[in-house]
Each structure stands twice: as C-alpha cells, then as structure tokens.
Amino acid sequence: MVTTDEEEKTGVIFLTKPLSLDGDSEVDYRAPNLIKRVLSLFKNVRPGSDLSRFQLSPLFNLPKSHLQCFGESVYCVGNDLLGRCNKGESPQERFTAVVSWSISILRPMIFGIAPYNPILGETHHVSRGNLNVLLEQVSHHPPVTALHGTDEKENLEMIWCQHPTPQFYGTSVETEVHGKRQLKLLNHRETYEMNSPKLLIKFLPLPWVDWVGENRIQCHETGLEAELYYGSSSFFGLRGNPRTVKGKIFDSTSFELLYEIDGQWDRTVKMKDVNSGKETVIYNAKEAISGLKAPMVTDQKGVWPSESALIWGILSQAILGKDWSNAREAKKAVEEKQRELLRERESRGETWVPNHFTVTHSKEGGWDCSPIQKWVPSAPISVPL
C-alpha cells in the first residue's frame, strides 16, 4: 500500500496478496448465513441470464479487479515455469513445459466474493524479473481484457484477449472465458495457442468454486497438441477433491498418443510416457502457487492514472478495514466518474480507443487484441523474487 500527503487528490495505490493455494487472501469473508445472502443477490435474476452487467455490493467484493486477477495468474508464481518453456531442448520438452505452465495459471477462487468489474481503459502494469506484463480493459460492455507480456532476455511473448460471460443457472453460476491465448517462444519460432476452462460457482448442496471443462493447447509448428479436462471426481461435491485434471498429449499429424496426464491441479499432476510407462511429476501446486507475495510499488511517479491499484485503491482500503460506508461511497465515485466521461464522449461524438492494443471484433471470430508495442516496458510495480 502507498499513500501520499495529498491522498484526496492523488488517491491510494493499494496492492493486496494474490490468490494462492493457501487461500492466502487478506479478506477473511465468513459472513453468517453466507449461502442465503449470496442467493438473495439473484432472487430477481432468471436462470440463463448473462451476469456480465451484474453489480455487486462492496460486501461481496475481493479488494482487486478482474484485471489484477488475470495478471496475477501470469506474474505471481513461486517458481519460473514460464522460463522453463524456452529451455526445453526438444519440441516435446518445450510442449510439456507449456502444459505445466498452463496448469499454474489456475488459481483457487474464494466462494462468496468476486473482483471488481474493470472500468473502460483501466490498466495494470507489473514486472517480475525480466517479465513485463501490461493489461488493459479494452471494452466495458461486454467486458474484454487484453494482456501483453514480454521477456526480452528469454525472447518470449504472451498475448491474451479475454471475454468472460457469466450466466446464472439457479443453483450455480458458470463463467465461460472466451478469447485466444498465445504464448510465443521466439527463439524456436513456436506459437502455442490455448483456451481457458470454465469457472463454476456452485451454491448447493455445498458452496464451491472450481475450474471445469476442456483446455486445449496447440502448437501448429510442431504438430503437438494437448487436451486437458478439468472436473470433479466427487459425488455432488460432497466428498473427494474435485480439482482433478486428466488429459493427453499427442501428435496431431499422425494422431500418435505420446503422454497421458492425471492429477489434481491444487496438488500434483503426473505425466506418463505411453511407450516407456515412465511417470513424471510435471506440476507441483505447493511449489508454484503457495505463499505468493504481493506486488510492490517501486516507482510511484511512474504509476499511470489508469492503474487498477490506484483506481480502486480507496475502495480496497475500505473493504480491508470493513468500513462499508466509505466502501460504498468509493465504489459509487468510480462508477459516477465513468458515467460522466461517457456522457462527455457522447456529447462530442467520440468513440473510445484503447491506448495499448488494436482491437477487432466479429461475430464469427470473436474479439482479437494486438499489442501496439513490440516489447512491454519495465513497470513501476514489481513482484519480489
């Protein structure tokens, strides 16, 4: 957290711990009658409704925006799984490293609270070592987030475009994350394309949040492909660990099965070579997403006015202090400012244009975001190594 003497004018840059394996959040949400209170939010919502415009009271907010949560999945990690992707000597070694890294992107969510909906033009700019990551909210309705991450030393690049669509189904909310994710290993001239599994929030019979569905990873240059399936091995969520992942890696040109994958993404995941029968642990959640550290401001003057941690800083501070009156006022102030800016643009006949991405949209191809800069510059916010 950073404050200044002119806090009322400049706001507060407020950064919190990332979501990690330990449930290590600075919010301890244990409200009485939690299920009843959560379900009361949806009493006037019809099953099948799109919740992308749904507004939450600060009482149900995690003290950070979706923009920050997306970014944390990339730059907050206990070991350098991303760097390993570039170091594999063979295409198969690099591909299995990419699979391991893709599993590490998943983070345990907390039932009963959700991040803020980012405002239009909101940014989040963070560095971890040589990895520089920049996110921008390129659309508000519908919500679309663009991410660009680069590491000049390792010569790798990430480009994501995410469009989540949460829908209410009576006893659950299911969020499908549309959009393309790319990881480019420029030294090897390889591009890995992948999608995201769905986020499922279940209210009954027991409250639970989990990642479910298919995650497909492809590299057209090598012909290698992976199909991962996230889901539950428990009966109605009453027993067992539902955070399972099963799948396979195969050569898409010959359809030869190479490896089988099995495990739990919040524990360990193993890979079995189908030819030799040898098993290898390719992912250990305790090493990757346990005890993660919060980012820190290293150059306060370099923080943009659009920075997520600044826009929502006063609100986040109020939520952690359980000062709900000031939290409501802070959230209202951000929302009113956005409505005012929208009215001003409409009065001038202007259309908002992203600052860091070129965005295209079509009904057939969905949303596509291309970064304007080749390399993301070092950020004024960094993650301690």
Image: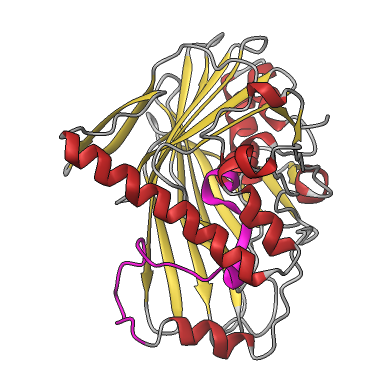
Q: Is the residue 300 above or below the residue 309 in the image? A: above
Residue nearer the viewer, 309 or 30: 309
Q: Residue at x 66, y 28 (%)?
A: 82
Q: Position of residue 378 (x, y in %)?
A: 65, 17
Quarter-of-image position of residue 29: bottom right
Looking at the rendered image, the quarter that the C terminus falls into is top right
Is residue 274 visible to the viewer in this orientation of the structure? no
Looking at the rendered image, the quarter that the N terminus falls into is top right
Q: Residue at x 18, y 40 (%)?
A: 347
Q: Tell me: 354 left or right of 9.
A: left
Q: How many marks?
A: 0
Q: Position of residue 145 (x, y in %)?
A: 42, 40
Q: Tell me: 64 left or right of 190.
A: right
| Magenta stretch, residue numbers | 44-69
Q: Residue at x 62, y 78 (%)?
A: 234
Quarter-of-image position of residue 91: top right
Q: Position of residue 164 (x, y in %)?
A: 40, 53
**Is residue 190 located in the magenta-colored stretch of the structure?**
no
Q: Residue at x 38, y 37 (%)?
A: 180
Q: Is the residue 179 above or below the residue 379 in the image? A: below
Is residue 178 visible to the viewer in this orientation of the structure? yes
Q: Is the residue 306 above or below the residue 32 in the image? A: above
Q: Position of residue 114 (x, y in %)?
A: 56, 63
Quarter-of-image position of residue 98: top right
